[in-house]
Amino acid sequence: MTTVQTIEIHGLSKRFGAVAAVSDLSFTVEPGRVTGFLGPNGAGKTTTLRMLLGLVKPTSGTATFGGTSYRQLRAPLSTVGTALEAASFHPGRSAHNHLAVYAAAAGIGRARVDTVLGQVGLADYAGRRVGGYSLGMRQRLGLAFALLGDPGVLVLDEPINGLDPEGIRWIRTLLRELAAEGRTVLVSSHLLSEVQQTVDRLIIIAGGRLVYEGGLDELDHSTQVVVDSPNRPALAAALLAAGAEPRETDAGLAVVGIDAARVGAVALSAGVPLSLLMVQHGGLENSFLELVGEGGRP
Ligand SMILES: Nc1ncnc2c1ncn2[C@@H]1O[C@H](COP(=O)(O)OP(=O)(O)OP(=O)(O)O)[C@@H](O)[C@H]1O
């Protein structure tokens, strides 16, 4: 593996005429973990990745690998592995032929072609025309191409899309292994459920803007405590006095921003008996949808 780099995005913007596809986006992607790049359709993910890979010129801002833009990299294929569009391979040529051409152009040994085809599970289909491949097989070929130069950074656009359940399990394991080897792995998706079990960290955009950067656990912020008492008014008064804002629900009083132990302690010191005390998680998906809003407009 060649040097591992951090992906650095600073004040990145792109306008297509009247459309602000990406607006003042800044984030970093660290080595050693799988980072999910999430957002609904049209959020600006592909445009951001294309700017990062030098395929689209930013209106302003920078996108680099440890300070060096993609076009300035000395050995791009061995520094950054990319899989942008699964369908962009020539249908008349075989997987082996495709990779052999790229390997020769980049000065990568021919043996590496068989290694990566084996790594993605295409060894038995390497001589077949890509035109006959399923979407899942083309995804695997895209990944083989990304891995060809044994790069320290991987940038993958929707790599899980089109895979069957076995393929999804396989790619999850592979991405985790690549990150565990110390590589920087960035994976885009428009579905949180698709990457939830794969990523350690999330970058979420909506309407071209950053709406969240952080871990999965912190994203699930919609946790509430539901509590009740035979003397509900006394419990509500005690919670109010403790600074909480209890809300009446069918199940009891719901409070946020205060944990269950503290709620129990408040009731005890007020001498209010409890009939119910439970923690309810709103769930990651709900938090995600709250952040991105309907149609990607938070
Ligand atoms: N070449 C282009 N010319 C004009 N508008 C564009 C161009 N490329 C992207 N856009 C617009 O920019 C916005 C962001 O698109 P982008 O493809 O980056 O989103 P995305 O998050 O990748 O969505 P998806 O998940 O559907 O691929 C959209 O409104 C899109 O229509």
Image (tube, rainbow, N blue to C red):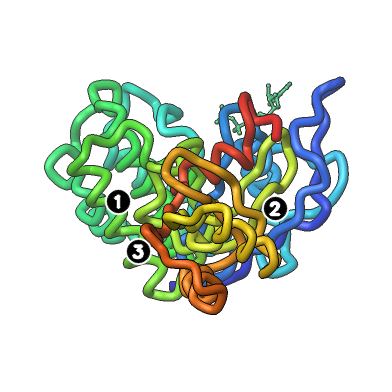
SS class, disc 2:
helix
Crowd around label 2: few <14 · some 14–19 · many ≥20 (10 Å): few
Relative placement, left or right, of 204 versus 162 is right
User: Of the residues under marks 1 and 3, which one precedes in the sequence?
Assistant: 1
Q: Can residue 64 be seen in this view?
A: no
SS class, disc 3:
helix
Residue under numbered circle 1: 171
Crowd around label 1: few <14 · some 14–19 · many ≥20 (10 Å): some
Would you say the beta carbon of the disc 1 residue lies within 8 angstroms of ligand 1? Answer: no
Disc 2 marks a residue whose amino acid type is Arg
Disc 3 marks a residue whose amino acid type is Arg
Name the spot of residue 153 as percent of width and height, x first: 51, 63
Residue drawn at point x = 59 percent, y = 62 percent: 214
Q: Which mark is residue 112?
A: none
SS class, disc 1:
helix
Name the spot of residue 170 as percent of width and height, x first: 23, 51
117 and 96: which one is in front?
Answer: 117
38 and 82: which one is in front?
Answer: 38
Residue drawn at point x = 70 percent, y = 62 percent: 8
Residue drawn at point x = 51 percent, y = 65 percent: 184
Would you say the beta carbon of the disc 3 residue lies within 8 angstroms of ligand 1? Answer: no
Relative placement, left or right, of 142 versus 68 is left
Q: In this view, does 177 lie above or below 282?
A: below
Disc 1 marks a residue whose amino acid type is Ile
Residue under numbered circle 2: 71
Q: In this view, does 26 lie above or below 41?
A: below
- Residue 164 appears in which quarter of the rendering? top left
Q: Residue 176 carries which label?
A: 3
Give the Cα distance between marks 1 and 3: 8 Å
